[in-house]
Amino acid sequence: MAVLSASCLPPPVFAADAVLAVLDGAIAVVCFVQLLRIHLQSQQQGWTSQKIFHLMIGSCTIGFVAFFITTIIATCEGWRCWPHSCGFILMACPQILFLAAFLLILSFWVDLCHQPNDEEEEDEEQNSYVESLLDKSKKKPGPGPPAGDTHRARRSCCSWPGVRLGSRQKFVILVIVLTFVFMFAFAVLIWIGRAENPLDSSLLTRVYLDIFSVAVLLLGGALACYGMILFSKMSKVRSETVSTEKWKVASLAIVSLVCFASSAILALATNVPVLSYRYSEDSNTIFGSVFMFLYFFIGSSVPCGFVIWVMREIPQRAVIERPIQQTVVTFIRDNRSANTTTNQNPQWRTAVTSSQSKTLKPSPI
């Protein structure tokens, strides 16, 4: 393949790169502005999953902007390393960040689909309350926190808002690290293939992008499946908030399936990803630029923009800081008859605690 290294990009290709750079740049600006607003509103919560997703999507879109701008500069300046590894690395890195963000969403959806139901949660809370009473009867009172508070603190540490990694999230991190290693190994082989040897740089690039497209296609199918499962589970709950959140889950699952399947099929059927930074003299620039625009716009820009739109709500600080449970407990202690009833029926306190904790459950998005 004769690579155009001394001349600038054809006008259709230049226009496609410029429009994609502007679109992804706008998404990145919105992403980081939204991240700043969320952080200023909830500084006491630290780095929540909502902030992490904004940071990942913003970093991904900035990577694509750098790739599109550098493609124009490298082709016009005739960089020799650009068609050999440099362009490949700069294109693959934001794609892997994009993959990581949606794999993380999938891991959280899997956790929600496989979590215990409400009856099991109530039994667990009731058993923990009984265990705390047994501990109090066996141990002398000390300055340490009660066992019930320790159990609730342990449950809050593993809840959705905090950045506490479960086994599935750690597996996602491992997969992304291995993907980066896999990508850099291909980059080294592509760099070696530029010389006179049996390795073909274009074929290696094509193999990597086909493997990545299959992974994206499988990810879209997994998001669709678990999104529908989560939607069916949320449909059984009668709540205005849950009704809103379930449609967000369903819409994100549908958008992910359509966008990922379309971009993967386009990449597998054409040579668009390779042509995004490596152009041949006999290629049809008009059709190539249109296909390249559709590949990046449908495959990355639309899903990233939709995720940011779904996560646009600013968390309310008052809901977190309001001590509802302490007020109820203080009111009960002031009444002797109510205190006697509570001691005789510990399940009542468990039901109150369970109902209050359920009202503060965060969004699955």
Image: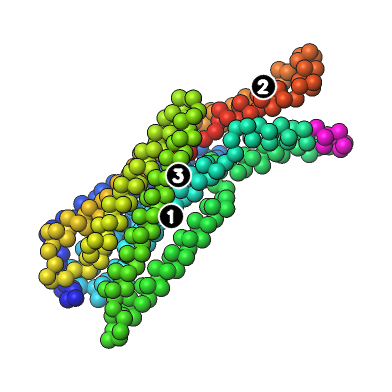
Q: Does the magenta stretch include residue 134?
A: yes
Q: What residue type is labelled 1?
A: Ala
Q: Is residue 139 magenta?
A: yes
Mark toward the viewer: 3 or 1: 3
> Is residue 155 among what the camera can see?
yes
Mark toward the viewer: 1 or 2: 1
Q: Which amino acid does label 3 sit on?
A: Tyr
Q: Mark 1 to mark 2: distance in Å?
A: 42 Å
Residue drawn at 21 percent across, 54 percent down: 293
> Is residue 24 among what the camera can see?
no
The local crowd at label 3, few if under 14, some if 14 to 19, many if 20 or more residues have their Cα within 10 Å, is many
Give residue 86's position: percent from left, percent from top. 31, 70
Q: Is 54 left or right of 302, judged from the image as shown? A: right
Give residue 342's position: percent from left, percent from top. 76, 20
Is 215 situated above or below 308? below
Span highlighted in magenta in the image: 133-141
Find disc 1 in the rendering and name its residue. Answer: 100
Is 125 situated above or below 106? above
Task: Point out the image quarter for the C terminus.
Answer: top left
Question: Quadrant of the rendered structure where residue 137 is?
Answer: top right
Question: In what element is the residue under mark 1?
Answer: helix
Find disc 3 in the rendering and name its residue. Answer: 226
Q: Is 1 left or right of 189, judged from the image as shown? A: left
Q: Is 181 left or right of 189, judged from the image as shown? A: right
Looking at the rendered structure, which numbered label has been put on residue 327?
A: 2
Question: Quadrant of the rendered structure where residue 135 is?
Answer: top right
Residue drawn at 51 percent across, 37 percent down: 42
